[in-house]
Amino acid sequence: MKLEEIHRVGFIGAGKMAEGIIKGILQGGLFPPERIMAADIDTRRLEDLNTDYGIETGANAEAARVCDLLILAVKPQHAGEVFREIRGDSLKGKLFVSIMAGVPTRRIETGLGGEIPVVRVMPNIAATVQSAASAFCLGKWATPDHAAIARAILETFGTATQVNESLMDAVTGLSGSGPAYVFAFIEALADGGVMMGLPRDTALTLAVQTVRGAAELMIQMKEHPAILREKVTSPGGTTIHGLAEMERRGFRNAVIQAVKRATMRSEELGKDA
Ligand SMILES: NC(=O)c1ccc[n+]([C@@H]2O[C@H](COP(=O)([O-])OP(=O)(O)OC[C@H]3O[C@@H](n4cnc5c(N)ncnc54)[C@H](OP(=O)(O)O)[C@@H]3O)[C@@H](O)[C@H]2O)c1
């Protein structure tokens, strides 16, 4: 199966994440609206998506029947009911891309009842603004062609990195939970400014643009962060004093341990999935 052979893409579950992906696909010109179908139990939501994006809407079973590529975007606790609704012979030859956090490919394959190609993705909340850091892994029946299709879709709403399924909990601990760590950092940076006399809104504006600018610099210069950090740390200057205080307070280790704890929690939650 190649991207050109996909006639229709269907979303099962059309919430926040699905909408972000739909926007990405449309903006990226991957599929026109008439080749995208959204299914959801909330019919008002479907009407809104139809009005806002001109996409088709329908029931889960219809999407599963008419689409060649299905994106599973319901909450993990609704996975079982969706599988029961759509499973069967008619799924043969279709590709499933799941963004359901913590649901292993084996469970999706079994739930759908066959030798179904599955690509499991861990995006993050920035998918809603087409800036996600996504990682994906392949199920037992997914081929490199399926991976290429998934990558093409994921890259319309951010970056995509392929990993082994055993690393999906670590991905969850880093980029899945990561936006919250960054929000906490931005808030702390702004609080520091407020402590030193800046008005709150000025401090927040400076803090968020500092994080965005630093990330943009790293992306554009393709340099390791340590090199960039050295470039902005002049001898005896303000930055080295700030950094030394961060080191003394264990900033780096706190972040490392946050990723570790979140990964462990993801592993624990996965035992029930
Ligand atoms: N949000 C994130 O940051 C994030 C990050 C990584 C992965 N994910 C994963 O992305 C998936 C979607 O998350 P989300 O934030 O977009 O959730 P969401 O906004 O709640 O969207 C899920 C949608 O599915 C609908 N739904 C529930 N049961 C259904 C069923 N049986 N058939 C069809 N539709 C059904 C829900 O309707 P009701 O609201 O009426 O129930 C809702 O509109 C989740 O599996 C989550 O684990 C989310």
Image: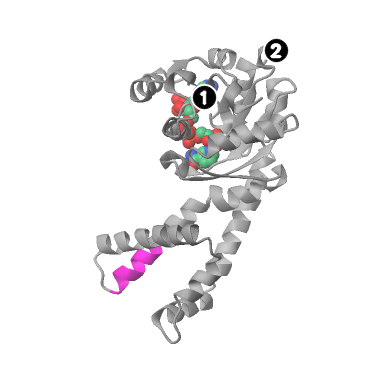
Q: Residue furthest front?
A: 4
Three-letter code, disc 1: Phe
Circle 1: element type: strand
Which image quarter holds the C terminus?
top right
Q: Is residue 12 above or below residue 144?
A: above
Q: Residues within 10 Å of mark 1 (few under 14, many from 20)?
A: many
- First in sequence: mark 1 or mark 2? 1
Q: Is residue 209 above or below residue 39?
A: below
Q: Which residues are magenta?
A: 188-196
Please identify the dominant SS of the magenta region. helix
Out of 271 and 43, give the one closest to the viewer: 43
Which image quarter holds the N terminus?
top right
Mark 1 highlights which residue? 11
Lateral position of residue 263 relative to residue 176, left or right: right
At a point 47% along the width and 78% down the height, the residue shown is 245
Mark 2 highlights which residue? 89
